[in-house]
Image (cartoon, coloured by chain):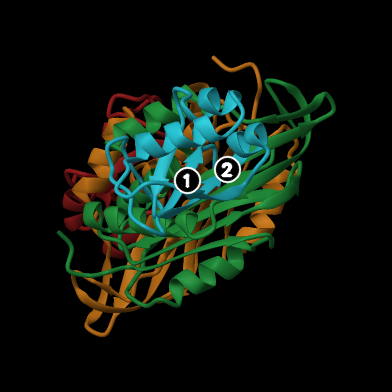
Chain colours: A orange, B green, C cyan, D red
Amino acid sequence: MTAFQPDCAVVITREDFSQDALQAEIFACGGSAGALATFVGLVRGAGPNGVIEAIEVESYPGMTESSIAAIFEEAAQRWSLLAVRVVHRVGRLEAGEQIVYVGVSSLHRREAFAACEFIMDYLKTRAPLWKKELGTGGAWWVEARDTDTEAAERWGL
Amino acid sequence: MTAFQPDCAVVITREDFSQDALQAEIFACGGSAGALATFVGLVRGAGPNGVIEAIEVESYPGMTESSIAAIFEEAAQRWSLLAVRVVHRVGRLEAGEQIVYVGVSSLHRREAFAACEFIMDYLKTRAPLWKKELGTGGAWWVEARDTDTEAAERWGL
Amino acid sequence: MKIDVLFFARIREQLGVSRLTAQVEQDITLEQLQLCLAEQHASHWSEVLGGENVVRAVNQVVAENDQVLAEGDEVAFYPPVTGG
Amino acid sequence: MKIDVLFFARIREQLGVSRLTAQVEQDITLEQLQLCLAEQHASHWSEVLGGENVVRAVNQVVAENDQVLAEGDEVAFYPPVTGG
């Protein structure tokens, strides 16, 4: 559908990230971006099971990256995009810490917003990543949420 | 509809802004934010009229701020939000410079995404702000776009 | 009574003025103010202020033709906005 | 033939193993591999691997029961994902 291939990258890392640094990288990709939509997910300090001190995030090294790269291709088929960056952290993350970043630049805002939400819905429901919550009452694997599944189904994911 | 009033602020300024600084301010507002959706609009280097060297942004001091504050109230009626920040620059801005920032935090991502896009659609179509493009071929006031009007009408704006 | 009148963006440039104080009769409407301004100034004011997409605000809130004005009101005329 | 088998998250914890090499007959399907693994290990393996929402991937691509495996394939079993 689109002749232009956006500049896309995904990083799975233990390190924290900075929106300003990622934004500079996205805009360095060239093109004439007018719009950048971003999403940052944080470790919440509370959940259905009570207080959360930290989480542990597990990935499937190799498949996590390749499945996210595949969803970039899918997004580029659906919308005209200039650059996409995803950072997903793994390992132990304390309450309030950043977990995930999705940044999408495009000429106009509608594409950037839609693709950013699309990629987040994918990360929540299809990319091999798992969260374990470490709370005062113990540790438990996070259950997949129906609302996330419904969000993903909107896109036919 | 909502019992909790989010922490909202709008700044109209000649100064540039930093996503990292604004994010820190948003997350300092308390609550247990799990999601931050942001949008940054840039001066594009080209448009329908050719090369754009810079733009000039004009506001209606007082009304620009109060009308954006009113849309915060509207957004808080529609979605459960924790904090909202809008920065809109005025004066001369060169191609590639940042024009506008919208950042919305909430417990879950759907609300943050929706409110961020809602506020952007408002800024594009209702808030008293005007752009003049300064190009190699002259200077011209930007025309309102039908696609922006349609975007605003989705929300009943 | 006195009304503060402001013009923005393209309208400001077309009229060559950003702000003026209009001396008008009590209780006139926004539409009547617009006619007064057109009469008191050059002929293109009528066309510029009466243009199809001109937005009018009274005391910084968007208003309609039949809104009645009061002493000291601030009235603004501006083109469709293009922020963001 | 040999198949690399990986387990993640809750499944990894329930089985107490993250990775193993399975020695199986040529050309078995993903479903047959799962039955073999359950036979060769403790009884709860059958329940854990056969759970309703278990996702299976072959060479890092999500796969169905009838997929035929080849020497050296990497097969993963994991629970519903919860990233983002």
State the residue at coordinates (73%, 39%).
A29
According to the picture, the residue beneath numbered tag 1 turns out to be C76
Q: Earlier in the sequence, mark 2 or mark 1?
A: 2
User: Residue D32: which quarter of the image?
Assistant: top left
Q: Position of residue A34 (x, y in %)?
A: 63, 37
Circle 2 residues within 10 Å: few <14, some 14–19, many ≥20: many
A116 to the left or right of B118: right
State the residue at coordinates (56%, 29%).
C45
Q: Position of residue A70 (x, y in %)?
A: 51, 32
Q: Position of residue D59 (x, y in %)?
A: 48, 35
According to the picture, the residue beneath numbered tag 2 turns out to be C8
Is residue C9 positioned above or below B77 on the image? above
- The front one of A111 and D17 is A111
State the residue at coordinates (33%, 42%).
C63
Between the C-alphas of marks 2 and 1, the distance is: 8 Å
Q: Amino acid at mark 1?
A: Ala
Q: Position of residue C51 (x, y in %)?
A: 48, 24
Residue found farthest to the front = C25
State whether residue C20 appears in this view: yes
State the residue at coordinates (37%, 58%).
C71
Is residue A54 positioned above or below A5 on the image? below
Which of the labelled discs sits on residue A64, or is there none?
Answer: none
B129 to the left or right of D1: right
Tell if the residue under mark 2 belongs to the same chain as the one under mark 1. yes
Q: Amino acid at mark 2?
A: Phe
Q: Which quadrant of the figure contains the N terminus of chain A?
A: top right
State whether residue A127 appears in this view: no
| Mark 2 element type | loop
Residue found farthest to the right = B136
Is residue C28 positioned above or below A90 on the image? above
**Subunit under mark 1:** C
- The front one of D22 and A145 is A145
